[in-house]
Image: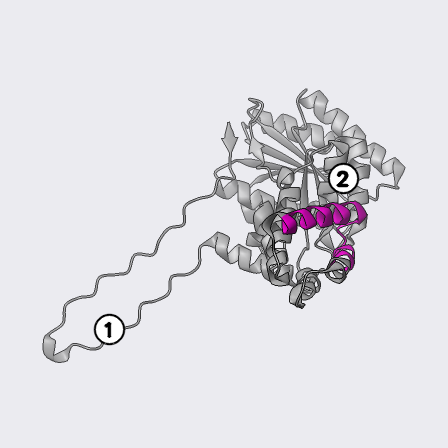
Amino acid sequence: MFSFFKKKKPVEATPASASPTPQATQQPPEPEAVPPAPPRQQWLERLTLGLKKTGSSLATVFTGTRIDEALYEELESALLMADTGVAATRFLLEDLRRRVKDTRTTEPTAVKALLAAALADLLRPQQRSLTLGAQGETTTVLMVAGVNGAGKTTTIGKLTRHLSLAGASVLLAAADTFRAAAREQLGVWADRNTVDIVSQEGGDPAAVSFDAVKAGIARHKDVVIVDTAGRLPTQLHLMEELKKIKRVLQKADPQAPHEVLLVIDGNTGQNALTQVQAFDAALGLTGLIVTKLDGTAKGGVLAAIAMWARQSGRVVPVYFIGVGESLQDLQTFDADEFAHALLA
């Protein structure tokens, strides 16, 4: 089984040994260079900075002098403004009151840490690693969907980079034949990552997907990523096209697609939850990628999604979150990291 998202131990910087110098000319020792932060630490700094707009409205709640109903009312408003949703807000506040009582907390500043713990516990079921070959298949097929503007094709490029660096061989399927230049955009990512791509100018999306899976299996690729056209859940004829692609993928490989991923824009707030519900009903989602969390005041939408999953019994993991445009700004989701970054 090929699982590529295992944290690597940071490589510690080894200071170079200094050459001995005569006593007469010996200079004061140079200050030791501070080693760069490990990549994950750098990512956490970017995540905290990206969530600052959401977190700042929450942080101001805990600047008072006592824990009272006014604090909880302010926190309720701040959570709703952060788009955590009514259900998740109610759940978090009830959980927070219990934690405050159990720990006998008396300082408002300490309540913030308790809220971070409550939020992390709510989000933790969404934290799972994307594992390739989990069902024994030699070629894992990822079908990627999303609305226009969510950053779907760019996210596929970043995901391809992650997979390639982890040693997986990838083939891309340019099944987004509706949007102008979509095929060319995916081709740029294929060239940048030095991976194969299957595309047809003006071809049928389902046919392109079928050919790509067959080619991936024949070429012994670890992963085939199918890029589909962006569409709104209300565009029923296009949603039917997505269902057709999924059916055709199953003809190419009865177990395909092994993952159905939805890319959602964190800026859209509660609309992101609506998208998750609609695409899940149509396709049966297996995972989410949340992009553009930087600069938004709506980062709490992950809590709304987690609450929907909790209430519906449909755990749809958040495999990745993105807070920027660079390749390293798409990273695996960690509930504790996200909760503490949000409330930093």
Tally of marks? 2
In the rendering, at what x and y percent does residue 44 appear?
Answer: 54, 56
Q: Residues within 10 Å of mark 1 (few under 14, many from 20)?
A: few
Depth check: 307 or 153 in front?
307
Which residue lies under the disc numbered 2? 308
The reply to whether the magenta stretch includes residue 86 is: yes
In the rendering, at what x and y percent does residue 124 appear?
Answer: 62, 41
Q: Dot 2: what SS?
A: helix
The reply to whether the magenta stretch includes residue 48 is: no
> Which residue of the protein is positioned furthest toward the bottom in this rendering?
24
Which residue lies under the disc numbered 1? 29
* Amino acid on which the number 2 mark rests in the picture: Trp
Depth check: 18 or 108 in front?
108
Depth check: 57 or 326 in front?
57
Q: Dot 1: what SS?
A: loop
Q: Quadrant of residue 45?
A: bottom right
Instruction: Inspect this view and state whether residue 193 appears.
Output: yes
Q: Which residues are drawn in magenta?
A: 75-101
Quadrant of the snapshot with the C terminus = bottom right
Please name the residue shown 63% across and 57% down the image. Answer: 111
Please name the residue shown 48% across and 38% down the image. Answer: 167
In the rendering, at what x and y percent does residue 126 appear?
Answer: 65, 39
Which of label 1 and label 2 is nearer to you? 2
